Amino acid sequence: QVQLVESGGGLVQAGGSLRLSCAVSGSIFSFNALGWYRQAPGKQRELVATMSRSASANYADSVKGRFTISRDNAKNTVYLQMNSLKPEDTAVYYCNGLRALTEPEYWGQGTQVTVSS
């Protein structure tokens, strides 16, 4: 059974940093892409950053230059380093994984990030 387990959320002041982790059951190379989405209260879930199997990264415009997605192949873990955090970054952050087109998307349980002004 595929599982994605996030950790690392919390409360931070504006301008601060957090690093989120997503531990993947099995090999991360079984995924075509892994990434992070977020959902703020009253808003739709939105893409934050994704990384393909070949390690090509893609970012939402709102986080470019502040957030960095990375992975540790040996630990089967994907990270999201978030710097220069803003109150508008406050949301529940979800890890997402895509394998074969015949499979559903995989989601973690989410981790809350709160940025105070």
Image (cartoon, grey):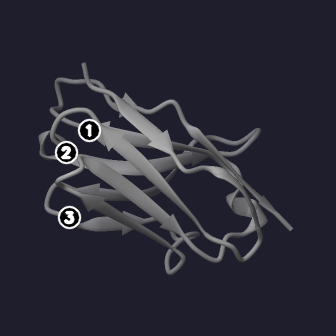
For residue 98, the mark is: 1
Q: Is 1 situated above or below 60?
A: above
Q: Name the secondary structure under disc 1.
A: strand
Q: Name the secondary structure under disc 2.
A: helix
Image location of residue 78, percent across then percent down:
34, 53
The answer for how far apart the CA atoms under marks 1 and 3 are is 14 Å
In the image, 83 versus 35, the foreground residue is 83
Q: Is 23 situated above or below 106?
A: below
Q: Is 59 situated above or below 7?
A: below
Q: Is 116 situated above or below 84?
A: above
Q: Name the secondary structure under disc 3.
A: loop
* Tag 2 near tag 3, CB within 8 Å: no
In the image, 34 versus 76, the foreground residue is 76
Mark 1 neighbour class, 10 Å CA radius: few under 14, some 14 to 19, many 20 or more: some
- In the rendered structure, which disc, 2 or 1, sits on the residue that comes first in sequence? 2
Quarter of image, res 84: bottom right
Mark 2 neighbour class, 10 Å CA radius: few under 14, some 14 to 19, many 20 or more: many
Dot 3 amino acid type = Ala
Dot 2 amino acid type = Ile
For residue 28, the mark is: 2
